[in-house]
Image: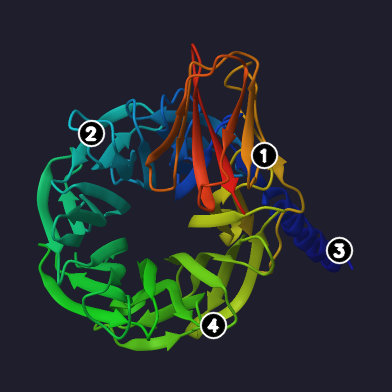
Amino acid sequence: MVNKLLCFFLIFSGLLSQAQDLFKRTYGAEGTFNQGFGLCNSNDQGFMICGATGGFGAVNGGGLVIKTDSVGIQIWAKAFGGGLNDVLKSIIKTNDNNYVAVGFSNSNSDLTIKGWVIKIDNQGNVIWQKQLGTGEWNYFESVRNSADGGLVMAGTTLMSDGSSGWVVKLDLNGDQVWEKLLNINGKESFNDLAAFANGDLILGGATESIGNGLKDALVVRLNSNGDIIYTKTIGFEGEDVCLGIDTAMNNSFAITGYFTQNDTKKFLIQWLDSDGLTLSDNISGSGPVIGKKIIHRGNNEFVIASDYKPFNAWHALGWITYSQLYVRCNKDFYGNKDSYSFAGALGKNNSFVVVGTTDAFTPGQSSIFMFNMTDSCQDSPTVVVNLATVSDVKIGIYPNPSSQYFNIESMLKPDLIEVYNASGQLVYVEKPIENTSTIPVSQWPDGLFLVKIKLSNQVNFQKVIVQH
């Protein structure tokens, strides 16, 4: 009887501990946009999130890094970059126990988009940073540690003759070792990469130069010097893209992304051997589902951060698979507005942690979310909303969405109002003469716009939607 009671106590204690470790949290600066794009484990069993923000001291939108503990409680948040648009897309813990984040920056003397690499310590102090690229537009999407202790980052560079998949290798001091461009016919891009134990690299992205359709998922294997071992496309007649890739056992690897069928994006996940031959796949026709990032967590089990749209809003969805890519479990993060996942990591008790961006819990702005899920599909029942106060000046924009006009109300008269479309083009400028302004949008196309409001001592960003 004593043994049975002890066994029950141990099981109950384990379940209680696991339940206490579950979390759903949001992060951001009040009244601004906040976006979460990258995630990694920290040196002290917590997490490091990277992204972009209009708060935390950023001038015109800065790269953001947030450090949390093991259950997602924020320890610190810092904005990095210059006076223009700066975004961090991916972050890793380096072999010397610091962190490197990559993305792109517009804050430079020639006002071009450069690939941006920044190395920080555990307190968020900058060790070094670099801007790279000679194209008209250069950006990094992913960074990994290389087998020899260096850093490898992948992305895309745009030039007058089209786009090229872009790979750069640096040492831990930020000095360039080599740079490679993949340009088959001027329509290539890379979204993620992973490293094999022997130093080879595997990259995932898209190409319109070769393959079966309009755009095909692209997989490229390189040796440690950046030379191509093989190139493979995966796709059908529509648009097909690889967004995430990771290595697994026996030099195999797995990819995720989407394929397009009847104008709907649907879930793509494949497990391939070292030569790029398919071992198993799980191509879902139920859509719309988009795989974003995939992580091998051992024994040929994978976790995937993805998005799906069951009704009117997108949900961020975490998947856990077992052998042959069969789905063990999935769990979503959602609200009455869109939530998008972008990255993942492994958490305590073998849980899967997903990070992304949501419009669901902070009216009038976007915030970063992070949540975890167990193998048995448990997650936290409640969302804890955290917002840092950046100013006592309140700014309201309504109605939002709108088909005719937006009203902007501020406690102080703005010095300048600028509106940018989703491509970053300036579409409207006003110098207000009072605290309330009205912006007519009846002739604007449907879509997302960014409103930049300059006050005497701050810059405020708001997102608005035009919907006719």
The correct choice, above or below, for 237 with respect to 127 in the image is: below
Q: Which residue is mark 4?
A: 284
In the figure, residue 276 lies in which quadrant? bottom left
Point out the image quarter for the N terminus: bottom right
Pick whichever, 48 or 385, lies toward us.
Answer: 385
The correct choice, above or below, for 74 with respect to 56 in the image is: below
Point out the frontmost of discs 1 and 3. Answer: 1
Tell me the amino acid under the disc marked 1: Thr
Of the image marks 2 and 4, the number of the one nearer the N terminus: 2
Of the image marks 3 and 2, the number of the one nearer the N terminus: 3
Cβ atoms at labels 4 and 3 below 8 Å apart: no
Q: Which mark is residue 111?
A: 2
- Distance of label 1 from label 4 (alpha carbons): 32 Å
In the figure, residue 390 lies in which quadrant? top right
Q: Residues within 10 Å of mark 4 (few under 14, many from 20)?
A: some
Residue pictured at 24% horizontal, 80% vertical: 232
Residue pictured at 60% horizontal, 58% vertical: 349
Circle 2: element type: loop
- Distance of label 1 from label 2 (alpha carbons): 32 Å
Circle 1: element type: loop
Q: Which mark is residue 30?
A: none
- Distance of label 2 from label 4 (alpha carbons): 43 Å
Of the image marks 4 and 3, the number of the one nearer the N terminus: 3
Circle 4: element type: loop
Q: Which residue is mark 1?
A: 362
Pick whichever, 139 or 356, lies toward us.
Answer: 139
Q: Residue 85 at x, y = what percent? A: 36, 35
- Distance of label 4 from label 3 (alpha carbons): 45 Å
Point out the frontmost of discs 3 and 2. Answer: 2
- Distance of label 1 from label 3 (alpha carbons): 46 Å
Q: Which mark is residue 5?
A: 3
